[in-house]
Amino acid sequence: EDFDRAIELNPKYDWAIAHRGKTYRLMKRYPEALEDFDRAIELNPKYNWAIAGRGVTYRLMERYTEALEDFHRAIELNPKYDWVIANRGETYRLMKRYPEALEDFDRAIELNPKYDWAIASRGEIYQSMKRYPEALEDFDRAIELN
């Protein structure tokens, strides 16, 4: 309701539109989430948080190609955005494209050495690849951090 009211007061308020989209995504109302992310991006084509948010929504819908397109675009806008790089890595992981996933998680962790989710996710990739010592090392590190 608060986002609706903010958007009613300012229909071009891209931040409120994108965050309402995130709220819809959290409610698993993906069509509405995509509609809001599309609108926020239309208002601000360089709004990489909204672009990446739409990518997460696509990933949750298992529309991986579209998710990757958004993550690539968001990373082009900000090559040091560790959250987006890790989310692209997660998309590659779900697609079982492990080398690309590892590359992204390594990069995200290099940018943010205390990024516990990225470290644990990289551990999951190592586990899937039966690289157990590396998986255990990452899981232990993630547990230490959180």
Image (cartoon, helix red, strand yellow):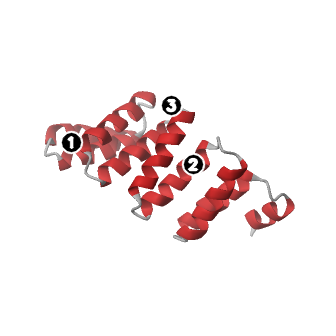
Q: In the rendered view, would you say 138 is above or below 11?
A: above
Q: Quadrant of residue 31?
A: bottom right
**Can you see residue 23?**
no
**Does the CB distance between marks 2 and 1 fall below 8 Å?**
no
Residue under pointer 2: 51
Q: In the rendered view, would you say 109 is above or below 26?
A: above
Q: Position of residue 110 (x, y in %)?
A: 40, 28
> Which labelled disc corresponds to residue 136?
1
Going by the numbered disc 2, the residue's amino acid type is: Ile
Going by the numbered disc 1, the residue's amino acid type is: Leu
Badge 1 marks a residue whose secondary structure is: helix
Badge 2 marks a residue whose secondary structure is: helix
Circle 1 crowding by C-alpha within 10 Å: few under 14, some 14–19, many from 20: some
Looking at marks 3 and 1 on the same chain, the residue that comes earlier in the sequence is marked by 3
Badge 3 marks a residue whose secondary structure is: loop
Q: CA distance from mark 3 to mark 1?
A: 29 Å
Looking at marks 2 and 3 on the same chain, the residue that comes earlier in the sequence is marked by 2
Q: Nearer the viewer, mark 2 or mark 1?
A: 2
Residue under pointer 3: 79
Q: Quadrant of residue 139?
A: top left
Q: Residue at x 55, y 52 (%)?
A: 53
Q: Residue at x 50, y 59 (%)?
A: 57
Q: CA distance from mark 2 to mark 3?
A: 14 Å
Q: Position of residue 41 (x, y in %)?
A: 65, 50
Circle 2 crowding by C-alpha within 10 Å: few under 14, some 14–19, many from 20: many
Q: Position of residue 127 (x, y in %)?
A: 19, 47
Q: Residue at x 19, y 50 (%)?
A: 128
Who is closer to the viewer here, 38 or 129?
38
Looking at marks 2 and 1 on the same chain, the residue that comes earlier in the sequence is marked by 2
